[in-house]
Image (tube, grey):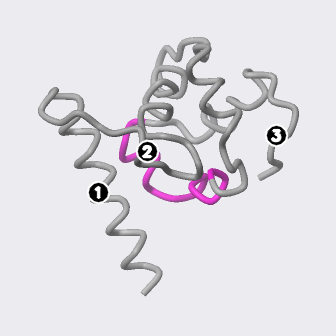
Amino acid sequence: MEAFKIKLFVVVAVLLVAISSNGVLQISNAQTICNVSVSGLMACKSAVTPPNPTTPSTDCCTALSHADLRCLCSYRNSNLLPSLGIDPNLAMQLPGKCKLPHAAHC
């Protein structure tokens, strides 16, 4: 059952990214992952996308300041992040780059 939930989440996440990047769908801030809105996560995408990641934006860091970092750690070794073009190692560096006081130790 857990594997099904993970696969379903991956499919939904990929569809949301694909649809939102084409401007077909407006994503609501009511949708959250690990206590972060989808728009907050999208604010961090350029900071975790190789080959030339940017410095995390203020919006990204603000979104992460409300995140359940342990929950986000659970995605570290999943195939979800790479399937979305996100480098897990860059993602794990964000709390430090944002100078968050309660960084999770994954």
Q: Secondary structure at mark 2?
A: helix
Q: Which residue is mark 3?
A: 103
Q: Quadrant of residue 85?
A: top left
Name the residue rendered at 68%, 39% in the picture. 66
Please state the horizontal and vertical placement of residue 18, each as a whole percent of the image: 21, 39
- Say which amino acid is labelled 1: Val
Q: Position of residue 1 (x, y in %)?
A: 42, 87
Element under disc 3: loop
First to last magenta residue range: 72-85
Mark 2 neighbour density, 10 Å: few (under 14) some (14–19) many (20 or more) = few
User: Above or below — where is 41 with respect to 72?
Assistant: above
Answer whether labels 3 and 2 touch (C-beta < 8 Å): no
Q: Earlier in the sequence, mark 3 or mark 2?
A: 2
Q: Which mark's residue is nearer the viewer, 2 or 1?
A: 1
Checking the image for residue 23, the label placed there is none
Q: Is residue 20 left or right of residue 91?
A: left
- Kind of residue at badge 2: Pro
Left or right: residue 56 compared with residue 18: right
